[in-house]
Image (tube, rainbow, N blue to C red):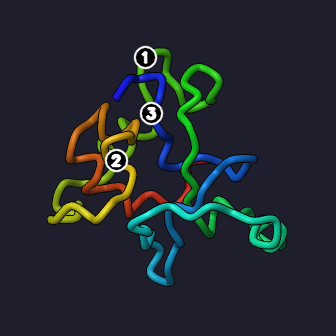
Amino acid sequence: MSPQGLLCPSAPLYEGARLLGVVNQTGTVDLLTTPLELDDDFIFAALQGRSPEKRFRFVHKCVKSACEKWDGHACGVAKTVLEKIEPQDWISTLPECGIRSQCRWYVQEGENACRVCPLVRYAY
């Protein structure tokens, strides 16, 4: 996959984003095996109350330097999460994922990014 076509697994909710997961009661993210297209009704409902990014995980194209989390060379979210979450807290088996081959975090950090992905609730 070309770096130009990579996807951000923690994108804000904006036009063209798809639903990647839902934050559950324990605070981890239940990832969908296939991201869902969002319709206007979902977007309207998601914008009510708390920030939708605190309740859901969205996927969209990685915009690299147009993103505040880009450090000039790589996604700062992926690197920071791997530094801050202790390896004993990582998920032992890779979660099912419908975007892995296109995921910025996976391409950048490998399988370890997948082991912490469901633990990332809010990157924005």
Residue 83: image quadrant is: top left
On residue 6, the disc is: 3
Closer-to-camera residue (30/99): 99
Horizontally, residue 44 falls left or right of residue 17, namely: right
Q: Of helix, strand and loop, which one carries label 1?
A: loop
Between marks 2 and 1, how big is the CA–CA gap?
Answer: 20 Å
User: Disc 3 marks which amino acid?
Assistant: Leu
Q: Earlier in the sequence, mark 1 or mark 3?
A: 3
Horizontally, residue 100 falls left or right of residue 63, namely: left
Q: Position of residue 32 (x, y in %)?
A: 44, 69
Which label lies toward us, 2 or 1? 1
On residue 84, the disc is: 2
Q: Residue furthest top?
A: 72
* Residue drawn at point x = 39 percent, y = 50 percent: 99
Labels 3 & 2 near each other (Cβ < 8 A): no
Q: Earlier in the sequence, mark 2 or mark 1?
A: 1
- Image quarter in which the N terminus is found: top left
Q: Earlier in the sequence, mark 3 or mark 2?
A: 3
Q: Position of residue 31 (x, y in %)?
A: 42, 68
- 69 lies above or below 92: above
Between marks 3 and 2, how big is the CA–CA gap?
Answer: 24 Å
User: Disc 1 marks which amino acid?
Assistant: His
* Residue drawn at point x = 43 percent, y = 16 percent: 73
Query: Which residue is identified by label 1?
Result: 73
User: Disc 2 marks which amino acid?
Assistant: Lys
- 78 lies above or below 44: above
* Residue drawn at point x = 65 percent, y = 59 percent: 53
Which label lies toward us, 3 or 2? 3
Q: Of helix, strand and loop, which one carries label 3?
A: loop
- 68 lies above or below 35: above
Horizontally, residue 7 falls left or right of residue 97, namely: right
